[in-house]
């Protein structure tokens, strides 16, 4: 990125964090992704080579630090990076409140929602032992239709391929509905009541689903331009 040629601290900061993808890379590290592949799962349209360069830049400027743990590189925010976290959240809140929420097919990517969702699930609310939940997005092609959340406390995994375990709860929905629910544009109870989210499985798991199905940290913030849900 070409510099602005100004001594202004805002200009200097923008030269680092204003590069394409950089804020999203910081978002992933801020949300707890540590290893390269986990960070990349949150920015799947970013090439691995570009992600490597962005992490190197952030490391060189003292915003992210790299450690080797059990032979693997792991990344975390430094003190300077930690001070950026509230600003990233404020920017995200501003974006939700004031920018048009046009949900095109390209922007309704349930893999990103599911990846974020699995990081926020309340582990203690899930049954002990292994619990497997299969999500089927009926509006997507077969290759992207089925996804799995596998819980075996304290671990929770998100799988894009069949993990090979017996499924305990089936969830049928579509990519737009899961996005609206995740961001708080449609109440989960409403989506279930209208059949936009259909649950198939034991009654106790169906009852518990709203308890452990998390919402985005942005869900409580209302939009100034409400979403057209039809």
Image: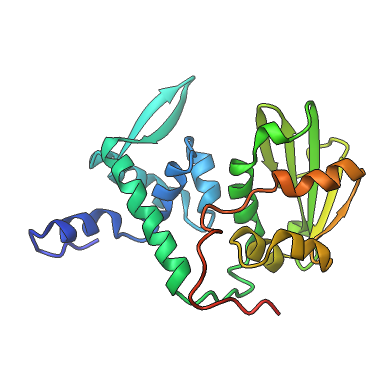
Identify the residue at the far top of this view: 70
Q: Nearer the viewer, residue 52 or 129?
A: 129
> Which residue shows up at 73% across the image and 34% down it?
151
List x then y, in percent, for residue 149.
73, 42
List x then y, in percent, for residue 94.
40, 66
Q: Height in image: 140 above or below 111? A: below
* Left or right: 193, with 89 as reference point: right
> Which residue shows up at 43% across the image and 61% down it?
93
Q: Quadrant of residue 13?
A: bottom left
List x then y, in percent, for residue 136.
80, 56
List x then y, in percent, for residue 144.
73, 58
> Which residue shows up at 50% across the image and 53% down it?
43
Q: Which of 142 and 188 is in front in this view?
A: 188
Q: In which quarter of the image is the C terminus?
A: bottom right
> Which residue shows up at 29% across the image and 43% down it?
83
Q: Quadrant of the N terminus?
A: bottom left
* Left or right: 108, with 17 as reference point: right
* Left or right: 153, with 89 as reference point: right
Q: In which quarter of the image is residue 74?
A: top left
What colour scheme was applied to this rendering of the protein? Answer: rainbow
């Amino acid at each position: 990125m070409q510099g602005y040629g100004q001594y202004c601290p805002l200009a200097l900061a923008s030269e680092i964090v204003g590069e394409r993808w950089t804020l999203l890379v910081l978002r992933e590290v801020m949300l707890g992704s540590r290893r390269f592949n986990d960070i990349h799962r949150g920015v799947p349209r970013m090439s691995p080579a570009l992600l490597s360069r962005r992490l190197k830049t952030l490391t060189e400027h003292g915003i992210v630090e790299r450690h080797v743990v059990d032979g693997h590189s792991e990344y975390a925010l430094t003190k300077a990076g930690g001070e950026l976290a509230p600003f990233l959240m404020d920017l995200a809140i501003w974006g939700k409140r004031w920018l048009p929420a046009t949900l095109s097919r390209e922007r309704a990517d349930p893999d990103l929602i599911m990846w974020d969702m699995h990081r926020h699930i309340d582990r203690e609310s899930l049954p002990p032992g292994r619990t497997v939940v299969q999500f089927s997005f009926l509006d997507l092609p077969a290759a992207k239709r089925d996804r799995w959340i596998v819980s075996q406390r304290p671990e929770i995994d998100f799988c894009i391929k069949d993990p090979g375990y017996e499924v305990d709860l089936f969830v049928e929905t579509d990519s737009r509905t899961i996005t609206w629910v995740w961001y708080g544009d449609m109440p989960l109870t409403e989506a279930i009541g209208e059949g936009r989210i259909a649950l198939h499985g034991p009654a106790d798991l169906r009852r518990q689903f709203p308890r452990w199905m998390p919402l985005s940290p942005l869900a409580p913030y209302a939009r100034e331009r409400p979403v057209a849900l039809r």
